[in-house]
Image: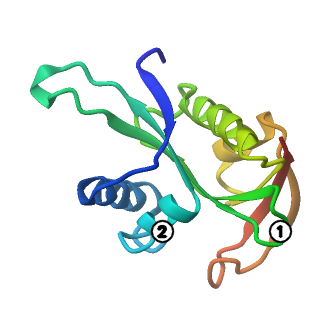
Amino acid sequence: MDDIIVKEVKDFDLDFILEIKKLEIENLGEVSGINEWVIPVLIKYGKLIIAVQKIKNADIRGKDAIIGVNELIRDWNEHSCAFIHSFYIKEGFRNKGTGSLLLKKSIEILKKNDIKKLELTVDPQNLAAVRLYKKFGFKISGFKENMYGKGVGRNIMVCDI
């Protein structure tokens, strides 16, 4: 884990946007992933926090590999609340503490921005994600049937940070 850092994205270029788009599709599917129209807006008006693995191989020219993504937006009605739009860890880095590191560091960043509460939705069948969120104090506050389309229900989870 010494080679993994978590950072907030504040600047971007087209290559970065396309890399995030590719990760979105790989991890969330074609329908769920956001695209190059939404990613810049999310970076500018929301928060994009990533986990990167430092690559030391000279053949790759020292480029960091994005291995985790946390996309957040702020609640317009409750300004001290943020909503986790998407949270995922790249396959091959799951169940190794990467998700915990990304969520822990994300919470530290959010606290510095006066966020006191986090909300998210999660597939009830995604047991690994539910376990991770519960580990950080999230509690299921409800279930929304057909939240993201017919037959796509989600647990709503909340946490005071």
What is the x, y in percent for residue 113? 71, 46
Quadrant of the image occupied by residue 21: bottom left
Q: Can you see residue 74?
A: yes
Q: Is residue 103 left or right of residue 34?
A: right
Q: Residue at x 63, y 77 (%)?
A: 148
Quadrant occupied by the C terminus? top right
Q: Closer to the observer: label 2 or label 1?
A: 2
User: What residue do we see at 79% from left, 74% from top?
Assistant: 144
Q: Nearer the viewer, residue 24 or 128?
A: 24
CB within 8 Å, label 2 to label 1? no
Kindly identify which residue carries mark 1: 143
**What x and y, as percent, mark residue 122?**
69, 58
113 displayed left or right of 4 = right
Q: Residue at x 71, y 72 (%)?
A: 153
Alpha carbons under labels 2 and 1: distance apart: 28 Å
Q: Which mark is residue 21?
A: none
Amino acid type at circle 2 is: Val
Binning the other alpha carbons within 10 Å of mark 1 as few (below 14), some (14 to 19) or many (20 upward) gives some
Lateral position of residue 147 relative to residue 28, left or right: right
